[in-house]
């Protein structure tokens, strides 16, 4: 193992330790403008480190990118999906997919059933 691999892994591990309180704090609000670029950088670094043969650094960067993904999912005021209610997200996804498969016009996807049927 190269010493640089160890240094980068320790740095990524420290960032995870420092980010953990944000993820635990239900009142934390981290804008997507902060979390999404940080998430992307973590994943790009992970791929870059992996191609350089720095597997420990890659694992650390992947973990940091994953931590930012969790923060974007659970601690952003404009959430990626309604993470507080996964069952609601699944129901909505099924409803939208069902409407798309039914052959109904696209405009009907954005109106309720009562409006589209005239009730």
Image (cartoon, rainbow, N blue to C red):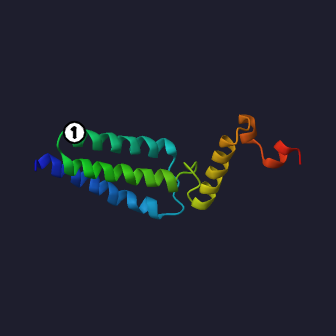
Q: Does residue 112 lie above or below 90 as drawn? A: above
Residue drawn at the location 14% of the way across and 46% of the way down:
4
Which sits in the foreground, 109 or 40?
A: 109
Which sits in the foreground, 53 or 15?
A: 53
Q: Which residue is mark 1?
A: 51
User: Picture quarter containing residue 82?
Assistant: bottom right
Residue 87 image point, x, y percent: 60, 61
Residue 77 image point, x, y percent: 57, 51
Residue 119 image point, x, y percent: 89, 48
Residue 35 image point, x, y percent: 45, 46
User: Picture quarter containing residue 43?
Assistant: top left
Residue drawn at the location 43% of the way across and 50% of the way down:
69
Residue drawn at the location 54% of the way across and 48% of the way down:
80
Q: Is residue 21 left or right of residue 14?
A: right
Q: Using the rendered image of the protein, determine whether residue 119 is visible from the camera's viewpoint.
A: yes
User: How many marks on residues?
Assistant: 1
Local crowd size for mark 1, using a 10 Å CA cut-off: few (<14), some (14–19), many (≥20)? few
Which sits in the foreground, 102 or 78?
A: 102
Q: Is residue 96 left or right of residue 113?
A: left
For numbered disc 1, what is the local secondary structure?
Answer: helix
Q: Does residue 74 lie above or below 78 as drawn? A: below
Which sits in the foreground, 119 or 42?
A: 119
């Amino acid at each position: 193992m190269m010493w640089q691999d160890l240094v980068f892994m320790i740095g990524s591990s420290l960032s995870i330790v420092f980010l953990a309180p944000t993820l635990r704090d239900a009142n934390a609000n981290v804008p997507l403008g902060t979390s999404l670029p940080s998430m992307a950088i973590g994943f790009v670094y992970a791929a870059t480190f992996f191609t350089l043969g720095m597997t420990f650094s890659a694992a650390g960067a992947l973990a940091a990118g994953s931590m930012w993904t969790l923060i974007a999912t659970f601690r952003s005021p404009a959430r990626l999906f309604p993470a507080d209610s996964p069952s609601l997200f699944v129901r909505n996804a099924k409803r939208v997919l069902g409407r798309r498969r039914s052959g109904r016009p696209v405009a009907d996807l954005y109106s309720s059933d009562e409006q589209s049927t005239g009730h």
